[in-house]
Amino acid sequence: MVKKVDLASHHKEPFASPAPLGLLGLAVGCAALTPIAFGLDITPAAFKTSAILALCFGAGCQFLAGYMEMRNGNGFGGVVFTLFSFLWVFNAAELWFAASGVLMSHPIKIALEIAVLLILLPLTFGFGYFSKLMFWFLVDIDVLFLCKIIAGITHTTKLAYPIAILTVLLGLLAIWIALATIINPLVGRQVFRVAGPLFFAPRQSFDFTTRQAIFDVLYHHSKDKAFVELDIESLVKAVQEKLGEKNIIPDVFYLWEFGYLAMTKQEDEVRSCRLTSAGVDLYEQLVLRKYQV
């Protein structure tokens, strides 16, 4: 029985994408801060309730997401989520102390916020390589910290409302991105639209033309001659008619070692070859788009 060639990576990540967990935890944390940020409830009970939610969802979910990203080999996402998880621990502690009438050191808090902003700025640039929406998500956090720094240094209360608006917007963006990550693959279309990258890294493209030409010639040969091997001189001539002067022997050996070609050799020289069933299936998947509905 002919088996379908598996084109998927054989590397299996230990966890599914943890990003939605971290983002939804962030959204719940922002929601817990909203009544206090707008001045709707500034009682000790409100501060303690927000502290518990910030610790469980803001810190807990993002710490788990950071750990799972690290285990999945995503250092960038792991660093960001883990960093934010400890910031939420700080937020929870600040809220709990405030409920008890204890204020944290103002200079240390300002120094922390400046340090975080300096860390966030290059991370914002990095997120631009994922998507435009992720970039603006980080810009929202940057502006939020900038407002908090200005308010802390100048002791102005005029930025309290913008900080509250930015907190709500941050939570909404987190929900949108999380649902896009969960729902879009499930339904097979972009229900929650996420624009492509803002920046693109330069990539070195691999030249597949020689190997594809070998496949082209041998596939059409197999349609006429079934599994009769094609002599190497005819193969070289046919490929060179497509691409010009090319040394195809290294590519022939490469495809043979992968099991896509059957080969007859004589004293380490290739005499003839043909596509194997795996080679035929690979060509039909990549070029003819077999199995795609």
Image (spheres, rainbow, N blue to C red):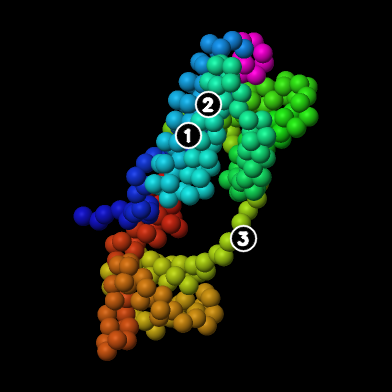
The amino acid type found where label 2 is placed reads Ala
Is residue 127 shown left or right of residue 272?
Answer: right
Is residue 20 shown left or right of residue 117?
Answer: left
Does residue 4 lie above or below 228 as drawn?
Answer: above
Does residue 104 lie above or below 69 as drawn?
Answer: above
Q: Is 174 part of what is drawn in magenta?
A: no
Which label's residue is closer to the chain start, 1 or 3?
Answer: 1
* Pick the front one: 146 or 222: 146
Whether residue 128 is visible here, answered yes or no, is no
Q: Where residue 76 sits: x, y (%)?
A: 52, 48
The magenta-colored residue range is 33-41
Q: Which residue is mark 3?
A: 202
Q: Residue at position x 62%, y 16% from top?
A: 36
Would you say the residues marked 2 and 3 are in contact, meaning their CB atoms lie under 8 Å apart? no
Q: Which residue is mark 2?
A: 93
- Using the rendered view, name the quadrant where residue 100 is placed: top right
The amino acid type found where label 1 is placed reads Gln
Q: Where residue 164 sits: x, y (%)?
A: 67, 22
Which label's residue is closer to the chain start, 2 or 1?
Answer: 1
Alpha carbon distance from label 1 to label 3: 31 Å
- Using the rendered view, name the quadrant where residue 98 is placed: top right
Callout 1: SS: helix
Q: Where residue 266 sits: x, y (%)?
A: 27, 87
Q: Residue at position x 58%, y 33% from top?
A: 193
* Pick the front one: 185 or 3: 185
Q: Nearer the viewer, mark 2 or mark 3?
A: 2
Q: Residues within 10 Å of mark 2 (few under 14, many from 20)?
A: some
Q: Which residue is mark 1?
A: 62
Is residue 120 shown left or right of residue 162?
Answer: left
Whether residue 270 is visible here, answered yes or no, is yes
